Amino acid sequence: MDSIERLTEFFRQFPGIGPRQARRFVYFLLTRDREYVKGLMESVEKVRQSVSICTSCFRFFTKEKASIHAGVFSSSSICQICSDTSRDTSLRMIVAKDADLEAVEKSHSYHGLYFVLGGNIPILEKNPEQKVRLRELNKLMESVGNRASEDKNNEPKKLKEIILSFSTNSEGEHTTLTIKQILEPFAEANGFKVSILGRGLSTGAELEYSDGNTISEALKNRS
Ligand SMILES: [Zn+2]
């Protein structure tokens, strides 16, 4: 494999990129000057160093720099949303991916916590737990159960509602139904509600590309 083919293979693994586009990326890079390529490589490296995954909601977040001069990043494993004490911890919204969470954040209509599932569940998938974070979701639900059985004043507010916010295409609908089934026994045992984002989102709509007003309406119309 020559070096052009090798780099093409890397780009081919990007979501939505076919072999021809991958090759175009390679030729594009070849036309750029050294500075551009150097900047790109440094940015990739930096993003790997400074971004980690939140152990509570599983979103990617940029760790704050503890010391800008030393370039050392803090080792916090909890993201800025999860550690924000002004957020309503009685609400948890489950979304498929980080881009969906960002769209909801931009709408400024939701102030609870999140859980990023890591994708939609493919319709004919036999082992969905290998594709998305079902084990992690189960763990979260178990911790909700444990918290409900304790009674402490300093504990975060009891979970009141989980909002399922998936796209309205067939995979999104399938994911909503599957997750609802998983959550129902926990909801019954711990007295929280499971709601689904209202269909203010038109059929086939992707949460990621919905504007703030649409998301805000869909939130109001959840059922
Ligand atoms: Zn988080």
Image (cartoon, rainbow, N blue to C red):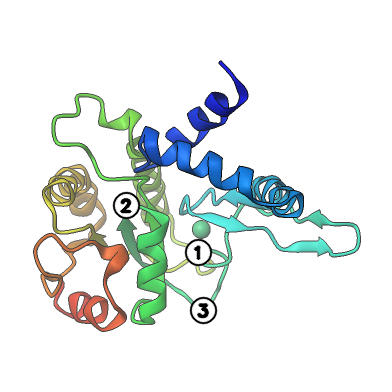
Counting from the top left corner in percent of width and height, residue 223 is at 11, 69
Q: Which residue is mark 1?
A: 155
Q: Which residue is mark 3?
A: 86
Residue 96 disc label: 2
The local secondary structure at tag 1 comes to loop
Mark 2 residue's CB less than 8 Å from ligand 1: no
| 2 and 3 marks in contact (CB < 8 Å) | no
Cα–Cα span, label 2 and label 3? 24 Å
Please indicate whether residue 163 sits to the left or right of residue 107 in the image: left
At horizontal 29% and vertical 67% (from top left) the residue drawn is 209
| 1 and 2 marks in contact (CB < 8 Å) | no
Please indicate whether residue 136 sits to the left or right of residue 206 in the image: right
Cα–Cα span, label 1 and label 3? 14 Å
211 vs 15: above or below: below
Mark 3 residue's CB less than 8 Å from ligand 1: no
Q: Quadrant of the N terminus?
A: top right
Query: Residue 36 falls in which quadrant of the image?
Result: bottom right
